[in-house]
Amino acid sequence: MPITHETLDGAARVGIEGELTIYTVAELAAALLPRISTAPRLEVDLSEVTEIDGAGLQLLAVIRREAAAGGTPVSLVGQSQAITQTLHLCGGTLF
């Protein structure tokens, strides 16, 4: 489950590739959560996520909550079909 990191126009862009599931969220959280407080803006690219479950949704909610608590604007800049379908089933978007 690769994670990409880059800075574009002052925004930290983080891309997640592969599964966003109970099997990967601990590793993802350890890599992503420390970046939230160091960025003036955070962009999350989920265009390469192949699978998401309840644990993945929880991680996205935690990212949003932590960013809001620290005053860091966060936005979703890409959605794979798996993300789009899951968010639709949940009644909307997280970001």
Image: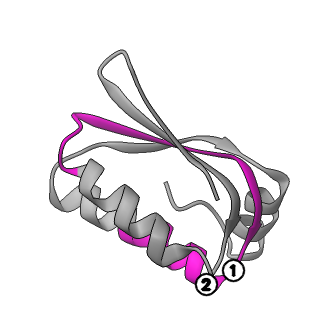
Residue behind mark 2? 22
Residue behind mark 1? 53
Q: Indicate yes or no whether the magenta region holds residue 14.
A: no
Q: What's under tag 2, amino acid-wise?
A: Ile
Q: Nearer the viewer, residue 22 or 65?
A: 22
> Under tag 2, what secondary structure?
loop
Rendered-image quadrant of the N terminus: bottom right
Q: Position of residue 22 (x, y in %)?
A: 61, 84
> Under tag 1, what secondary structure?
loop
State the separation of the CA atoms marked 1 and 2.
Answer: 7 Å
Q: Is residue 65 left or right of residue 85?
A: left
At 78% from the left and 50% from the top, the residue drawn is 80
Number of numbered labels in the structure image: 2
* CB under 8 Å between discs 1 and 2: yes
Region in magenta: 37-62
Q: How packed is label 1: few (under 14 Cα within 10 Å), some, or many (20 or more)?
A: some
In the image, residue 65 above or below residue 15: below
Q: Indicate yes or no whether the magenta region holds residue 60.
A: yes
Task: Residue at the far top: name it.
Answer: 9
Q: Quadrant of residue 57?
A: bottom right
Q: How packed is label 2: few (under 14 Cα within 10 Å), some, or many (20 or more)?
A: some
